[in-house]
Image (cartoon, rainbow, N blue to C red):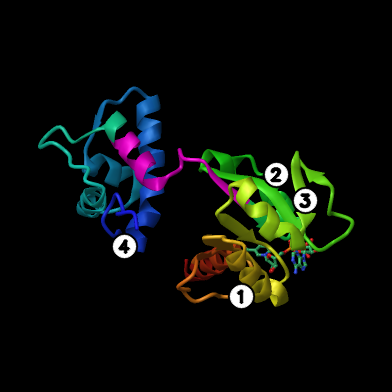
Amino acid sequence: METPRYPYVPEPAIRRLPWYLACVQRLRAQGVEYVSSTAISQQLNVDASQIAKDLSYLNIKGKTRIGYEVAQLEQGLNDFLGFHKCHNAVMMGVGSLGKALIMDSGLSRYGLDIVAGFDVNPELIGTEIAGTPVYDISELAARRESLGAEIAVLAVPVEYAAEVTELCVAAGIKALWNFTPFHFKTSPEITIENTSIYAHLAVMYNRMEQR
Ligand SMILES: NC(=O)c1ccc[n+]([C@@H]2O[C@H](COP(=O)([O-])OP(=O)(O)OC[C@H]3O[C@@H](n4cnc5c(N)ncnc54)[C@H](O)[C@@H]3O)[C@@H](O)[C@H]2O)c1
């Protein structure tokens, strides 16, 4: 097994890193060469000590009184986050959400390239969505390797989530970005990331109530 390039980083820290990256990218565009954790902290409302700790997981250390070199910090964050690497993915379920994700050009800026869709609907099979082919789900195992995809994005109706996931595992998929409300627990066979835009809405509604 390959040795990981970085030590284990806690999930809350990983979730903060893209915010640091966006901040550092803005600074570089403004021609700023060095930045302190205090300056980043003022923009993002995260403790400066927390920022320094998060960055230390990536082996990025600031210099006393000068801070972090912006270009180096951006490079380090990009390397760790993998946004500059290309990760081929397949879309499982090409309905309204699946189509929207295939058409979102923003994903490729974050290293995710959806190279094919798989569905059961005969009206979709054999078509293309923004140049991305849609195949019959029964062809996943035969096509996965040549598509170079180790990631599947799951956007099927919730009642099919478990069976489509099994198909993905059997086809050699290594990670699942799950958009269905089926909440997968961790699995020994596959990395699973459950995502819900609705959960964020719930937080927003709750905070509005509390204002
Ligand atoms: N996480 C989020 O924020 C979020 C947002 C929107 C939708 N969703 C979820 O995403 C899923 C898709 O939603 P939608 O609105 O796109 O639904 P949809 O009905 O428009 O699309 C579902 C697609 O899956 C296909 N499908 C059905 N069974 C399949 C199977 N066994 N294998 C492959 N494809 C199959 C259908 O033919 C259809 O094209 C649902 O589970 C929904 O709850 C989540």
Q: Which residues are magenta?
A: 73-89
Mark-to-mark CA distance, 4 and 2? 32 Å
Q: Which residue, given by chain and number where applicable, does mark 1 sit on? A: 182
Q: Secondary structure at mark 1?
A: loop
Nearer to me, 128 or 48: 128
Q: Residue at x 85, y 61 (%)?
A: 121
- Packing grade of label 3 (10 A; few <14, some 14-19, many >=20) is many
Q: Earlier in the sequence, mark 3 or mark 1?
A: 3
Which residue ends up furthest to the right in the rendered image? 123
Which-is-in-front pick, marks 3 and 1?
A: 3
Q: Which residue, given by chain and number where applicable, does mark 4 sit on? A: 10
Q: Position of residue 162 (x, y in %)?
A: 64, 75
Q: Which residue, given by chain and number where applicable, does mark 2 sit on? A: 103
- Horizontal relation, residue 200 to residue 155: left or right: left
Mark-to-mark CA distance, 1 and 2? 24 Å
- Horizontal relation, residue 129 to residue 149: left or right: right
Mark-to-mark CA distance, 4 and 3? 37 Å
Q: Is residue 97 visible?
A: no
Which-is-in-front pick, marks 4 and 3?
A: 3
Q: Residue at x 41, y 40 (%)?
A: 22
